Amino acid sequence: SELAAGVRDLDCEHLPVERAQGVHWDMEADLFRFRSVPAGATHTKRGVVRVVSSVFDPLGMLAPFVFMAKLLIQELWKAKINWDDEMTTPLTRMWMEWLEELKHIANFKMPRRFTSFSPRNIADITLHLFSDASEQGFGAVAYL
């Protein structure tokens, strides 16, 4: 049937890697993974925005990493650099450092589930919320 077209046979030796919320889910290891973004970016505002916006992270797991690039974009606007003009040396240095780190997001893996106990043994559940802010940005996280 057409409804069963997306059904996977999980009774095999090597489980597939599926996309879930734009993130790659390694079913065998039960991990979320990210793919490296192709480089080749120019040292212009247009090149920076193109590469930074191609890091698709709807769950925010890479937010601390992407935040640094967004600060760079903020600096490009403050410096009034046009879309296709070359960046100044300090900004180019920041960009090159971030691009070097970008290669490593393929090594970032996060377990889909963090529990080390049986859900049946849970007697009490508490929601913990944390947030912080500075002049440059803010962050928040919730734990169950």
Image (cartoon, rainbow, N blue to C red):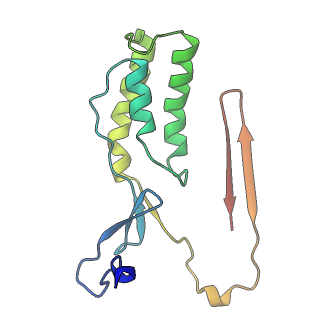
Q: Nearer the viewer, residue 6 or 17?
A: 6
Compared to 71, does 29 lie above or below? Answer: below
Residue at point 51%, 24% (across, down): 73
- For this orientation, the residue located farthest to the left is 13
Q: Is residue 111 left or right of residue 34?
A: right
- For this orientation, the residue located farthest to the front is 2
Compared to 89, does 19 lie above or below? Answer: below
Residue 86 position, x and y percent, is 37, 11
Residue at point 77%, 80% (across, down): 124
Residue 31 position, x and y percent, is 41, 66
Residue at point 43%, 15% (across, down): 83
Residue 18 position, x and y percent, is 35, 67
Q: Please give the count of numbered marks on the rendered protein.
A: 0
Compared to 106, does 12 lie above or below? Answer: below
Compared to 97, does 67 lie above or below? Answer: below
**Quadrant occupied by the C terminus:** bottom right
Q: Nearer the viewer, residue 64 or 50?
A: 50
Residue 13 position, x and y percent, is 22, 82
Q: Is residue 42 left or right of residue 124?
A: left
Residue at point 55%, 50% (across, down): 60
